[in-house]
Amino acid sequence: MKRITSTTLRVASAGLMVVSISTAVGAGLAQQAPVEIGVYSGRHYNTDKELYRQFTARTGIRVKVLESKDDAVIERLKSEGRNSPADVLVLVDAARLDIATDQGLFQPSRSAALERDVPANLRDSKGRWFGLTRRVRAVVVNPKLVNPATIRTYADLANPALKGKLCLRERKSPYNQSLVASQMILRGDATTRAWVRGMVANVKQPFFTSDTPLARAVARGECGVGVVNSYYVARMLSGAGGAEDKRLAEQVKIVYVNPSHVNISGAGVTRYAKNPQAAIKLIEFLASPTGGRGYAEANNEYPLRGVGNNPYLKGFGTFRADGVSVEQIGSRTKAATKMMETNGWK
Ligand SMILES: [Fe+2]
């Protein structure tokens, strides 16, 4: 037993072969060998690892994690096919969950715990993925340039009074693809198209590559208003990004429009999981009120229900979720991206 453990550890440090090797050894030892699952995650926050450790302490199931950019983990899983050591795939945003689902990277699971803990609009109707945390697409305002009280809905961002003041992230960001998809579902294609055009006419060029630099530009007065996931500004306020980011974040106001677009990070059991039962146990733990709180707090996100205890998020006030199903959003992201492209969203 001791010899096998040390072999497993040595292979673990060498890379991703660990799951198949330890499973092969375990097969000869019946119940004795520890179960190990592989997790591929598009989230990369150190605090996630602490939760995986807690899960192992509770269940004895070991977790081997590979964290990378979402697109990279999707590509890796695809190219590994049935040889992949991944049992669980964690991704952020409806757009990416939809891509992974389309490519057949998940298998359906049934779980009474997940049906209880994950609201129906935050999981796939066929059980291929389940929401774990919620993130809100918010409006970040520089009050010296734009009166925050004039922003009550996303539609207000198309107001010609904001000409040259609006900053947006690039079209290829799944966050904005999902935002536009949610508006197509709620307000219809024609209204959404007019809204996109109105916003593009207000945009101060160029489009941003990510949310944090956009929030900084709003703070510095280079933009009056922008759209970001609120956890980015919460992270800046927390000081995790350094004193300068904290100072900048203190210059802006987060406005939650009503209703707000809510997206998720989510996870599912991979199509070729070697240990689907252990995999679903991990997802159940991460979605449970206990595990889920930690998973959300790690990135200044909201838990699946309620608002949690994050002081920075509390400072942003309350939001009313639009209630749109994440699965439906995912199914419209391609059409949304096309609409953005044909209407000038770079
Ligand atoms: Fe993000």
Image: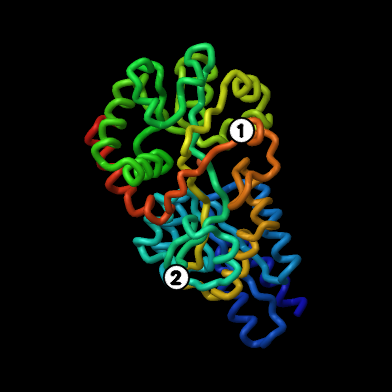
Q: Secondary structure at mark 1?
A: loop
Label whose residue precedes the other's in the sequence (1 or 2): 2
Residue 109 visible? The answer is yes
> Label 2: few (<14), some or many (≥20) within 10 Å?
some
- Residue found at x 35% / y 62%: 103
Q: Give the quarter of the image for residue 282.
A: bottom right
Which residue, given by chain and number where applicable, does mark 2 sit on? 107
Nearest the eye: 6 or 270: 270
- Going 37% across and 30% down the picture, which residue do you hit? 155
The kind of secondary structure element at disc 2 is strand
Q: Nearer the viewer, mark 1 or mark 2?
A: 1
Q: Is residue 18 above or below residue 146?
A: below
With 311 as the anchor, is 212 left or right in this view?
A: left
Q: Which amino acid type is marked by label 1?
A: Gly
Q: How many marks?
A: 2
Quarter of the picture containing the C terminus is top left
Q: Using residue 95 as the reference point, say whether residue 193 is left or right of it.
A: left
Q: Position of residue 329 (x, y in %)?
A: 38, 50
Whether residue 346 is visible here, answered yes or no, is no
The amino acid at mark 2 is: Gln
Which residue is nearer to you in this view: 59 or 132?
132
Question: In the rendering, at what x and y percent does residue 163 appear?
Answer: 35, 16
Q: Is residue 209 above or below residue 328?
A: above
In x, y percent, where is residue 13?
A: 64, 61
| Residue, disc 1 | 317
For residue 291, which numbered disc appears in the image?
Answer: none
- Position above or below: 279 against 147: below
Q: Answer with left or right where residue 316 lies relative to residue 309.
A: left
Q: Quadrant of residue 231?
A: top right
